[in-house]
Structure formats: C-alpha cells, structure tokens
C-alpha cells in the first residue's frame, strides 16, 4: 500500500495553482479551434499552390491583451465593433444582478499598454470572424501565443510591443505572469465578448430571506479550459443553446454549495490561477464554501490552495495540520500546548473547522486532524466560547478522550492550571452555554486529578514542579500554583492511590535533599511550599484513617515502604498489613534521589523533619481539626501551676471525649522534671482511652542535655494500680480520667513520659532551625 501523500502547504499550493493555470492556458491556445473560437486568421502561404493555414483565437483575448499596433496589423480588415457597454442589454436577464455587483470588484483597467483605449464588446459574440492575411504564420503564431500564455516569443516580443513591464525591476517572468492576470481579470470584469452566464438562485442575505438570483458573466473558452465540470457541461455533454440568437447561454449552479461570494472568488481563481486577484478578502464561512465549490467543479488546485490558506492564514497553522502523528510528536516532544496558536481567533474558529471537516460532503482528514489537535491544545480558556459549547455532544466527548491521552505526568501541571483558569473565566459568564463548558472543564479536571494521584511519584519529578521547589516559593505565582496542586491531590484520592500519595508527599517533597547542601532539605523551614504540602499530608493521612478497610481491600498498602506503613497506621494492630520486624520509620529511612549520590541519614532525617514541623506548630495549635501526629517532636516550653518545664510537642488536635484542641507532649525525665503529679493529670505513654495518639521515643535531641540522659525504664502501672482489660483501660478508670484530663495510659517504659495539655499552656516553641544538624 502506497503511503498517503500529505496535502501541500501554502507556498507549494500557490505554486501548483500557478503551474496548473499556465498549463490550462497553453492548452487553450493549442486547442483554440475546439474551445468556442470567434476569430480565425487565414494565413496565405508564399506559394499560391500551397494550402493556407488557419490560426484560431478569441476576440476577448486579443482586445484584452494586444497593443494597438497588433490590432492595427491583424484586425485592420473589419469595421470597428459596435459599442455596447452592456452586451446583453436586450436579454430578459440583467447583465449582473445586484448581488453579483455587490462583491466590490474594482473594474478599472490594468495600466498594461496591451489594451486598446476603449475595447467594445460585440453584440453577437458567437459570430465567427474570418481574416485572410499573408503574414508569416510562425511569427504570428508566436505573437498570439504570448497573448494567451505570457510565454513564447519572450523578451523580443515584449520589445516589439514596447511594454513597461519588460523594463520594470524584478523578475521578468513574474512581471509577465502578473500582467497576464491583470489582463484576464479586466476581460472578465468588463464582460468583454462574454458568451455565457452563471446563475445562482437562493436566499443570500441574513436580513432578507426572499429568494433572489445572482448572475455572473463569463467566457466559455476559459471555463472549459480550467474546470473539468464545465468541460463536461459545455463540450462533452453539450448544453442546448438559447432559443433567441442574441441571448447568451445560462448555466445554473446549486446553492449551496455555491454562494455569490464563493462563486466570485472561484471565477477569479479560474481566470487568474490565484485567490489573491483583488483587494477583497473572504471570511472563514466563505472559505468553506470555496472549498465545497472547488470539489463540485473538480478544481483540485483551488481545493489545495483554499485548504492551505484556511490552515496557514486563517487558523495560524492549526497545530501542524499537514503533519502525521509521528512527525507531530517528534517536533513537539509530546508537550501539551506547544504545537500551535492559542489566540482567541483560533479558539473561535477551531470548533467550526472541526464540524466542517467532518461534514459528509467534505471529509477532510487534514483539517480534522488539525482541528482536534487545536481543541485539545486550547483546553482551558480556549474552551470558553459559545462555538465550543455548540459542538455536538459526541464531538465534545471525543475531545475529552483526546485530552485524556495528553494528560501525562509531563503535562499534568500545565493542564491543571489551564483548567483552573478556564473555570475562573466561566464563573463570570451567565449565558446558557456556559453550563456546558463548565461541565466539560470539570470532567477534564477530574481526569487530571486522577493522573496526578495515580502517578504521583512521576508527576513530582517533573521539571515544572522541581523548578518551583528550587525557587522555594519566592516567585509570586508559586503560592497559588502549589495550592492548586495540593487541592488536586485532595480531589484525586482514592483507596488505591492514597498510600502512595502520602509516601510521595513526604519522601519526594518534604524530605527531598538540597542539591548543593546534602545535609538539608530543598525546602526551607519557612517555605510556603512546605507549609502547604504539610497541610496536604495531614489531610491525606486523616482521609486514609477514615477509609482503612476500603484501602486494605483495594490493596492500597501493598506497595508502601515500611516507614510509610507505620506512619499511616499510627500504631494500629492490623494483621492484614505486614510490617517490618525492624524499625523502619521515616526518620531512620535512608533516601536516595535519582541523579544524586547524596543520602539522608537517620540524624539528618530527624532534624529536617523537626524543621518541617516547627514552622507550622503554632498555626496548628489552636485550629487543627481532629488531630495530627508529629513523628519528630518539636521542642517547646510547657507552663503549669507548679513550674515550667521542657517538652516535645508530639500531637496537636482533638481527643476522644473532650472538647476543644489538645496538645500531646513528651516530657523527658531530667533536671526540669515536674514530678509524679501535675495538676491532677496522669502521665501516659501517648495513649488515652485505648487510642494511641503518639509513640514515646520520637522526641528529637534539640534540648541537648536530655539527648544524653541515661535511659531508665519506669513502670507506671504498679505505682498507680491501674487495671487493664486486654489492651484497654477499665471502664471505671477511663471515666475518672475523662473527668480530669485526657492524659492516661497504663504503660510507659522509657526515660520520657507523655502528657496532654491545653494549647495555651505551650508558652514557647523552640526554633528548630538553629539546631545542630
């Protein structure tokens, strides 16, 4: 199977149009005898016995192109034609309807000296004029060929005719082609010896819906030479002549596909071989009608040129419509939004182009391909148009599928921002079509959210995100963008991906090592990005603990590292989740990044985690809903009625059975130890009422003195006489503790003890930035 031929670009299409036009005119000259001639020169040979030669031609070409000297030499054997500004004034049809006259053509003549001062059309263009002469047949044939094609005798003929174009600067061939086009346009506009009419009947006005008829005058010899359709109509099949000899032939074309505007440009192309033959322009709808007209008339060169002009001039390349998918992917690298123009004009025209390309009488693969790429590339504000909302539902759904294929980790952030801007724009629109666009944008954003969470590790390794982290949120737009990304993370959570999302937020962002300082994290303690990511981490953890069973059923824990399992479980005993036998929490996990040999050791991880939590502790103390466990304690000062003492904040939030927020702290046994009793509150090991809020032993070493304190095991169970029922406190003991304080547990076997205090008792949070890392 032969490979498909790509449609030509604009330069190639215009060149092909010119070549086809020149070939057709050459064929007209060579076959003038069979193309409705109205003049013949009988050339007598020097030998009287030899047979005379005949050269056939058309009066319109001679009068439009030949200089006075040529007419004086070869047209001097007949009287001057009778002047008739309207050659069909006696016919029942007007020479041109008001519609065809309204196309705005400038009928002023070209300054070419090849024209007579006042050409006068014949009253009877069908009359054959015979001119006997004894001129040299070869010389005359070359001169006549130049009138038809601009070729033949070349520069010598131009010198004989004394043309100003021959002396103009620039390409001589280009000047000859330009002059030939101007002469033929003059012949068409002035209806010089016109012998056929083209009629269109229909309602062509947006305000007046009455049916009208538009009449265009033309020449049969031009039509049959340029269009296979007219060749069949006028020569192969033949068209009956009008009953009256002074009435021209009339051909009726259907409307649609033809309109007065599209037929005007089509006829201009037939005469000149280009659509740029006047100062008049056409809009996109007219361009579509021209393309349909070209199909109807079998004008391949016109079809290719108008297609190329639609793509290049009216739609700014339409996302490389003429390139196949493989080549398009090669030049764009699969990056969304980089393959074409995203201006407002393209946003309004792309939906109309897609509908046109898919029409049954069009089926244009190049325009369809480009329009689909454009509408995917215009996602966001480019969808916020009534034209897009007006697309059939099946087309809009297909565009969503196309966008989903482009929703990859490389493109996910750009698409997310585009969706946000589009939804913001639609909030200000109250038109009925706005609901359609909003629904489309939200559907696309849902896919983006799913990809971001399902492939979180890949997404957060993309240059777009790493660039934000390297800037550490100092750019103005970073704060908003990070907020949008974290909101997308929250929306995209499900039972299968929540665990990996949590693990990625911690390992790939919060504990990501600095590129040049391996002992510190990329995000500083005061980074706005860190604060927002930490808030998202807490929300993800809370979301997972509410859906524990569902996540386990969907195998959402299977791919997690040991430290992530332990953090997520928070001490839960779940026989369905395998946990490592050795300690493997985040604070002791060694993390290695791709492309870097730097690692984060146990002490580094613990210190950087403390830095991460310190910047948000004060914000969380008073308003954190439910609660958040801090795996690395934050140094702080606690105030009681008896004394002030040092501690580590380990939990912030609500506790079961008590109103308002509480802070769970771990208090080292040392010089500042407040004693066995503290305002009626019981010491514990981080649990209350059988619920564990934090583990004793996760405090950092920022206090220095207590980091080196000798470990001793303290058994609080015997001194307090607590009773246990399995792993839970007795009902009587639990009731008594709830009435006093939410701090209670019967087991604590370390050099530290746990306690729950009110946020207002936390007087000062020690800045962990200055700690020795």
Image (cartoon, rainbow, N blue to C red):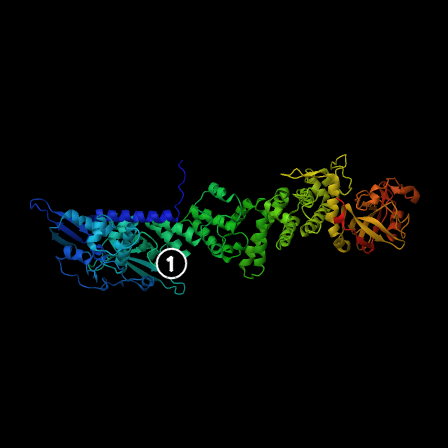
Q: Which residue is located at x 23 percent, y 50 percent?
A: 155
Q: Position of residue 549 (x, y in %)?
A: 72, 42
* Quarter containing the C terminus: top right
Bin the neighbour count of mark 1 within 10 Å (Cα to Cα): few under 14, some 14-19, many 20 and up.
few
Q: Nearer the viewer, residue 116 or 247?
A: 116
The image quarter in which residue 282 lies: bottom left
The answer to whether any part of residue 549 appears in the image is: yes
Q: Nearer the viewer, residue 586 or 658?
A: 586
The image quarter in which residue 203 lies: bottom left
Q: Up-down: is 678 above or below 725? A: below
Q: Is residue 720 left or right of residue 530?
A: right
Q: Secondary structure at mark 1?
A: loop
The mark total stands at 1
| Residue lying at the far top of the rendered structure | 581
| Residue lying at the far left of the rendered structure | 49
Q: Nearer the viewer, residue 321 or 208?
A: 321
Q: Position of residue 84 (x, y in %)?
A: 21, 64
Q: Which residue is located at x 72 percent, y 41 percent?
A: 564
Q: Position of residue 697 (x, y in %)?
A: 81, 42
Q: Position of residue 672 (x, y in %)?
A: 87, 48
Q: Is residue 248 left or right of residue 100?
A: left
The answer to whether any part of residue 299 appears in the image is: no
Q: Is residue 508 left or right of residue 95?
A: right
Q: Which residue is mark 1?
A: 281
* Quarter containing the N terminus: top left
């Amino acid at each position: 199977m032969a490979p498909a031929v790509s449609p030509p670009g604009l330069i190639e299409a215009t060149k092909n149009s010119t070549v086809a036009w020149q070939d057709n005119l050459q064929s007209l000259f060579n076959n003038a005898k069979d193309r409705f001639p109205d003049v013949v020169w009988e050339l007598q040979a020097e030998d009287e016995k030899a047979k005379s030669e005949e050269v056939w031609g058309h009066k319109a070409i001679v009068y439009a192109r030949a200089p006075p000297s040529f007419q004086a030499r070869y047209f001097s054997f007949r009287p001057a034609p009778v002047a008739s500004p309207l050659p069909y004034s006696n016919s029942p049809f007007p020479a041109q309807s008001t519609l065809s006259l309204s196309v705005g053509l400038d009928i002023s003549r070209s300054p070419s000296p090849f024209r007579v001062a006042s050409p006068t059309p014949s009253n009877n263009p069908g009359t054959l004029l015979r001119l006997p002469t004894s001129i040299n047949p070869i010389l005359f044939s070359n001169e006549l060929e130049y009138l038809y094609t601009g070729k033949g005798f070349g520069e010598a003929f131009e010198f004989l005719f004394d043309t100003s174009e021959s002396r103009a600067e620039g390409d001589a061939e280009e000047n000859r082609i330009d002059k030939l086009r101007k002469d033929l346009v003059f012949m068409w506009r002035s209806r010089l010896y016109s012998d056929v009419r083209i009629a269109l009947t229909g309602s062509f006005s947006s305000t007046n819906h009455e049916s009208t008829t538009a009449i265009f005058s033309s020449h049969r010899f031009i039509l049959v030479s340029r269009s296979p359709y007219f060749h069949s109509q006028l020569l192969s099949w033949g068209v009956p002549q009008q009953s009256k000899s002074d009435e021209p032939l009339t051909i009726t074309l259907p409307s649609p596909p033809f309109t007065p505007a599209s037929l005007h440009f089509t006829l201009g192309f037939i005469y000149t071989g280009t659509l740029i033959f006047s100062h008049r322009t056409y809009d996109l709808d007219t361009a579509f009608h021209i393309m349909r007209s070209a199909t109807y008339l079998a004008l391949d060169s016109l079809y290719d040129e108008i297609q190329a002009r639609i793509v290049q001039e009216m739609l700014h390349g339409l996302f490389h419509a003429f390139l196949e998918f493989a080549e398009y992917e090669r030049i764009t690298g699969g990056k969304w939004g980089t393959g074409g123009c995203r201006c407002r004009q393209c946003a309004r025209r792309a939906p109309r182009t897609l509908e046109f390309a898919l029409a049954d009488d069009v089926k244009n693969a190049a325009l369809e391909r480009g329009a689909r790429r454009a509408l995917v590339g215009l996602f966001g504000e480019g969808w916020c148009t009534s034209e897009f909302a007006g697309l059939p539902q099946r087309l809009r759904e297909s565009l969503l599928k196309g966008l989903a294929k482009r929703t990859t980790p490389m493109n996910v952030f750009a698409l997310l921002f585009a969706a946000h801007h589009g939804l913001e724009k639609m909030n200000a629109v109250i038109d009925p079509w706005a609901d359609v666009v909003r629904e489309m944008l939200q559907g696309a954003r849902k896919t983006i959210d799913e990809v971001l969470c399902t492939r979180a590790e890949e997404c957060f390794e993309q240059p777009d995100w790493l660039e934000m982290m390297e800037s550490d949120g100092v750019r103005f737009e970073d704060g908003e963008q990070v907020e949008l990304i974290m909101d997308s993370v929250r929306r995209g959570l499900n039972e299968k991906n929540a665990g990996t999302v949590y693990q990625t937020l911690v390992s790939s962002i919060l504990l990501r090592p600095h590129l040049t300082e391996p002992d510190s994290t990329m995000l500083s303690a005061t980074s706005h990005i860190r604060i927002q990511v930490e808030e998202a981490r807490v929300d993800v953890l809370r979301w997972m603990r509410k859906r524990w069973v569902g996540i386990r059923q969907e195998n959402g824990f299977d791919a997690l590292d040991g430290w992530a399992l332990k953090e997520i479980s928070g001490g839960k005993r779940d026989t369905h989740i395998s946990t490592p036998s050795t300690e493997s929490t985040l604070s002791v996990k060694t993390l290695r990044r791709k492309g870097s040999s730097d690692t984060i050791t146990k002490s580094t991880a613990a210190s950087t985690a403390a830095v991460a939590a310190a910047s948000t502790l004060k914000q969380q103390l008073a308003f954190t809903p439910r609660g958040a466990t801090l795996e690395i304690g934050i140094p702080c000062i606690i105030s009681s009625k008896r004394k002030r003492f040092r501690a580590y904040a380990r939990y912030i939030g609500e506790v079961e059975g008590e109103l308002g927020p509480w802070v769970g702290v771990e208090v080292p046994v040392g010089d500042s130890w407040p004693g066995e009793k503290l305002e009626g509150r019981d010491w514990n090991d981080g649990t209350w009422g059988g619920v564990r809020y934090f583990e004793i032993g996760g405090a950092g070493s920022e206090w220095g003195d207590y980091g080196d304190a000798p470990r001793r095991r303290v058994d609080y169970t015997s001194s307090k006489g607590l009773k246990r029922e399995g792993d839970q406190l007795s009902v009587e003991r639990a009731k008594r503790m709830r009435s006093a304080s939410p701090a209670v547990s019967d087991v604590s076997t370390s050099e530290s003890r746990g306690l729950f205090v009110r946020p207002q008792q936390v007087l000062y949070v020690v800045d962990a930035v200055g700690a020795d890392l």
